Image (cartoon, grey):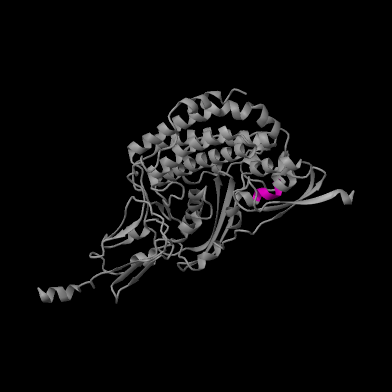
Amino acid sequence: MGDRRTVIPFGPQHPVLPEPIQLKLVLEDEKVVEALPQIGYIHRGLERLVKVRDFNQMVFVAERICGICSFQHAMSYCLSIERLMNIEVPERADYLRVIWSELHRVHSHLLWLGLMADAFGFEAMFMETWKIREAVVDMMEATAGSRVIISTCQVGGVRRDIAPELLQQIVKLADDVQRRVKAIEHSVLNDYTIKKRTVDKGVISKEQAWKLGAAGPVLRASGVKWDARMIGYAGYKYLNFEPVVETAGDCYARTKVRFREMFVALDLLRQAVAKIPAGEINVKVKGNPEGEAFIQVEQPRGEVTYTVKGNGTKNLEKMHVRTPTFANIPAFLTMLPGCELADVPVLALTIDPCISCTER
Amino acid sequence: MFGMLSPILKNGFGKPATRLYPFEKREAFDKARGQLEIDIDKCIFCGMCQRKCPSTCLNVEKAASKWELDPYNCVICGVCVEACPTKCLSLNKVYRTPVYVKENQIKIGKPPVKKTAAKENA
């Protein structure tokens, strides 16, 4: 048996991977029997920068941990510092944070759907989803000034307000995106080719997902009803939503969860715009952080945790980030044994890997 | 199988999704952040922008009345614009254009007149 095994390196450069990660796949014929991951190609040492940047400047560094869910990284960092310093953020700022977070979630899921479609050669879907995404990033530029890394969060609130006319445009955009996503729903969820590539592939049971510490859509697709937004950070405490849960735990279930999550995000946008109160958008921050704080935030890829430790100076003593992709790697490695070599790209994409987050 | 037919037909016979770029340009949004600009005559060289900048792209020397920007290091966050006490910094809406040689922008201004000295002269 031993002499039939072959080791094939998957990555660090691979057409389906926008970022470098290597998997050493041990194969028996076409079947994967073992996978050994290797990360560390794009480590930047961002957490270490707390020693040289003060806690206000670190917001922009935290934002650059990820190039897709950047606002949520900045928000997580700000929430953890606010918890440390007992800062009460104005209600309007909480709502604005929800609006930008959900815009990020929609654009991230659309981007993922495009990449997924591209991975199995569905070019028309790839073009269509990225075309819809363009309207969302345009809205971010209109409201914040930049397309993805929007730099609007700060410790104590947000830096920019959204005018009432723009808020109405966000509602219009949500309706428009909903209509356009609905138009492709049938093709994504009922297509024979997509089902052939995803149904019963990479199955993770509920117990396995929970035990391996999976996060976000990977966890929810296996039947665990857990979404960090249920904790009620930022403005989520004022809004109603139900996490999207599937039970099959395969690639198809993960696709469905992400697809349906877009509608939840659009609904949250409408709710936030309807309920947003007038008032201040930030409070003045006095003093330096001291003590330790921990925060959980739901990103498009899953739950991110931030742990910060201050020592009373303007520089933090320590910052630690656990990103959702890092949490999903053990689950991913459990999915791989038993699958065909040709399914590995699709499996890799269904955990929505963000390697620059993972390595920071 | 025919689920994508309607979007595909629309794309085939509808208007193109892209613009003919150099001939047709999109208007910048009101809040768009382009490049950092300075009105050097208003600058008092206090160095507040340099201290607040998260990417350390600014260098201010009071003695030489010099304000230096590394535009390729700047992340265009706009913190310096908010921090400037004399409001001499601003962000325009034009994106940075490609260059052959990366050079820092150096502006030399007039040294700020001290208030007491200005009163004596008056």
Instruction: Please state the horizontal and vertical placement of residue A306, each as a whole percent of the image.
Output: 56, 55
Q: Residue at x 66, y 48 (%)?
A: A328
Residue A94, by quadrant, is top left
Q: Residue at x 59, y 25 (%)?
A: A186
Answer left or right for A8 relative to A257.
right
Q: Specify the principal SS of the magenta part.
A: helix
Q: Is residue A228 magenta?
A: no
Instruction: Please state the horizontal and vertical placement of residue A11, each as a whole percent of the image.
Output: 67, 51
If the image is split into quadrants, where does the C terminus of chain A sit?
Answer: bottom right
- A119 to A281, vertically: above or below: above
Closer to the camera in the image, A159 or A44: A44
Answer left or right for A104 relative to A92.
right
Q: How many badges with numbers are in the image?
A: 0
- A355 to A178, vertically: above or below: below
Answer left or right for A114 relative to B59.
right
Instruction: Please state the horizontal and vertical placement of residue B10, each as a whole percent of the image.
Output: 48, 25
Q: Residue at x 75, y 43 (%)?
A: A341
- A337 to A253, vertically: above or below: below
Answer left or right for B37 relative to A47.
left
Residue B121, by quadrant, is bottom left
Q: Which residues are magenta?
A: A327-331
Q: Residue furthest right?
A: A1
Closer to the camera in the image, A263 or B14: B14
Q: Residue furthest left?
A: B122
Closer to the camera in the image, A313 or B109: B109
Closer to the camera in the image, A238 or A47: A47
Instruction: Please state the horizontal and vertical placement of residue A109, each as a whole percent of the image.
Output: 55, 39
